[in-house]
Amino acid sequence: MATLITGGAGFIGSHVAQRLLAQGERVVILDNFNDYYDPALKRLNIQRLGNHPNLVVIEGDIRDAELVNRIFAEQSISRVAHLAAMAGVRFSVHETPLYVAVNLIGSMNLFEAAAAQEVKHFVLASTSSVYGKTEVLPFVETDTADRPLAAYPASKRAAEMLGHTYYHLHAMNVTVLRFFNVYGPAGRPDMMPMQLMEATLSGRVMKLFNGGDIHRDWTFIEDTVSGVVSALERPLGYEVINLGVGNPISLMEMVEAVEEFSGRTINWEPVETPLSDPPITFCNNEKARRLLDFNPQVSVHEGLRLTWDWFRQWKKL
């Protein structure tokens, strides 16, 4: 039996694969190595996993229903960590058809294949972006989350609700994990921590929304992975669960931390916050603590230091 990890060459997916392989489990990765960011970084993530006897890597697209069905039929899939997605709130603003095709139709293909093979455990990655510009702070799962600000969160929220259909009709355990701003070593280059670290070398002028006075609830990669693995091990029926620390910091605080670790000054200028971006993400993680024994260990300051240490080695500084 095997765990299927879609998007397993990506930042979170490759770390989940690494954890499961270390536990002696069989892993099947499905990833299309798309160019939303440099595919070479995803190839490096796969290389990091090594030539492991319990690992199968399949290059393909979740929009390919025939391929998805074949994987479920041939690879003895017993559970799914569906982490593949078109990511990025701002990029989605002008790419609605693409985001619906990947994040909703692609998810449907996986649910359909899982139902056909009677796979009973499905973990679906979602996002804190589904909460939009809510006035309910901290973000809590009982919020309706029905006012998305862009196609990315809208497509993710739709996939969440689709998951309930498969729970209801097929007795499939579906756990939706709403990730909060995941960062860490080998992180996505489009995310702010990596962009700021790159800016310490390039001198690039960073555009800070609202002069750096926006707040995000950053979650270290190893804490996120612990939450995903716990969800994979606990069939819960249908549950939507926030996965974050619950301690948002301002963008300016992040700038100052990176400057502290690097010993360099980051050049920046204030810009207006786009309509697609909320002023804050703020996680109520009580449900994750209760159902998943989620207990994040790494503070943002410590996580940024660990990320900078990795970045410095990667860049040979």
Image (cartoon, rainbow, N blue to C red):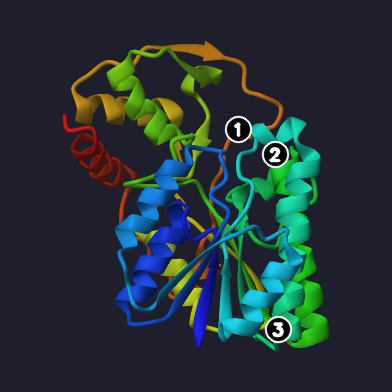
Q: Which mark is residue 279?
A: 1
Coordinates of residue 213 in the picture (x, y in percent): 50, 24
Residue at the spot of label 2: 133
Coordinates of residue 88 in the picture (x, y in percent): 61, 39
How many residues crowd around disc 1 within 10 Å: few (fewer than 14), some, or many (20 or more)? Answer: some
Q: Amino acid at mark 1?
A: Pro
Q: Is residue 200 left or right of residue 17?
A: left
Residue at (33% x, 13% y) in the render: 203
* N-term-proximal mark, 2 vs 1: 2
Coordinates of residue 84 in the picture (x, y in percent): 59, 57
Quarter of the image for residue 90 reads top right
* N-term-proximal mark, 3 vs 2: 2
Residue at the spot of label 3: 172
Q: Which mark is residue 94?
A: none
How many residues crowd around disc 3 within 10 Å: few (fewer than 14), some, or many (20 or more)? Answer: many
Q: Amino acid at mark 3?
A: Met
Q: Are marks 2 and 1 in contact (CB under 8 Å)?
A: yes
How many residues crowd around disc 2 within 10 Å: few (fewer than 14), some, or many (20 or more)? Answer: some
User: CA–CA distance between discs 2 and 1?
Assistant: 7 Å
Residue at (39% x, 57% y) in the render: 46
Q: Amino acid at mark 2?
A: Lys
Residue at (42% x, 65% y) in the render: 16
User: CA–CA distance between discs 3 and 2?
Assistant: 31 Å
Label 2 SS: loop
Q: Nearer the viewer, mark 1 or mark 3?
A: 3
Residue at (23% x, 32% y) in the render: 315
Query: Between residues 240 and 119, which one lies in front from this camera angle?
Result: 119
User: CA–CA distance between discs 1 and 3?
Assistant: 36 Å
Query: Between residues 183 and 47, which one lies in front from this camera angle?
Result: 47
